[in-house]
Image: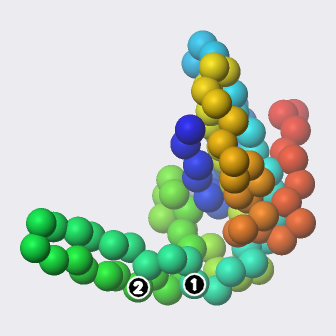
């Protein structure tokens, strides 16, 4: 399973992709509802560096996605993959997540 938070142009562009065999692509849109995402942890055998992140960014083009910005949450899973327990992760990031329908 792969999860991405995307800006609207990147999210909508991904609708045009042809999914691979057995691949299931789910997109929902909404407004970003968090101020600061979780920090990034870089671990080595001897240390851990914590890098604070000021704002969500598009996982494709790196456009900042501040609280209130329109965004698309994309999940790519595979047909035979077990359903994870935390389905609905989009609601952790987006206000009123709404499914995006292909045009
Ligand atoms: Zn983008």
Question: In the image, 76: left or right of 101?
Answer: left
State the image coordinates of residue 37 (x, y, percent, origin top left): 55, 77
Q: Residue at x 73, y 73 (%)?
A: 32
Quadrant of the rendering where the N terminus is positioned: top right
Mark 2, secondary structure of its residue: loop
Q: Residue at x 62, y 57 (%)?
A: 6
- How dense is the environment of label 2, judged by Cα within 10 Å: few (below 14), some, or many (20 and up)? few
- How dense is the environment of label 1, judged by Cα within 10 Å: few (below 14), some, or many (20 and up)? few
Quarter of image, res 84:
top right
Where does label 2 land, which residue? 52
Q: Is residue 43 visible?
A: yes
Q: Which of the two residues, 34 or 81, is positioned nearer the viewer here? A: 81
Q: Residue at x 73, y 59 (%)?
A: 90
Give the distance between the C-alpha atoms of the residues marked 2 and 1, in whole angstroms: 9 Å
Q: Residue at x 62, y 73 (%)?
A: 65
Q: Of the numbered discs in the image, which one, if any, rests on residue 85? A: none
Quarter of image, res 13:
top right
Quarter of image, res 27:
top right
Q: Of the numbered discs in the image, which one, if any, rests on residue 36? A: 1
State the image coordinates of residue 102 (x, y, percent, origin top left): 84, 34
Mark nearer the N terminus (2 vs 1): 1
Quadrant of the rendering where the C terminus is positioned: top right
Q: Indicate whether 5 appears above or below 44.
A: above
Q: How is the image coloured?
A: rainbow
Q: Is residue 8 visible?
A: no
Q: Indicate whether 24 appears above or below 48.
A: above
Q: Indicate whether 89 appears above or below 3.
A: below
Q: Which of the two residues, 26 or 60, is positioned nearer the viewer here? A: 26
Question: In the image, 54: left or right of 17?
Answer: left
Q: Indicate whether 80 appears above or below 34.
A: above
State the image coordinates of residue 99 (x, y, percent, origin top left): 87, 47
Cβ atoms at labels 2 and 1 below 8 Å apart: yes
């Amino acid at each position: 399973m792969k999860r991405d938070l995307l800006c609207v142009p990147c999210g909508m562009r991904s609708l045009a992709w042809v999914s691979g065999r057995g691949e299931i692509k789910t997109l929902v849109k909404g407004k970003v509802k968090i101020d600061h995402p979780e920090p990034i942890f870089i671990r080595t055998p001897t240390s851990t560096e914590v890098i604070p992140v000021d704002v969500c960014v598009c996982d494709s083009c790196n456009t900042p996605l501040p609280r209130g910005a329109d965004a698309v949450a994309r999940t790519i899973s595979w047909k035979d993959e077990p359903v994870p327990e935390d389905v609905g992760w989009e609601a952790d990031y987006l206000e009123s997540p709404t499914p995006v329908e292909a045009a």
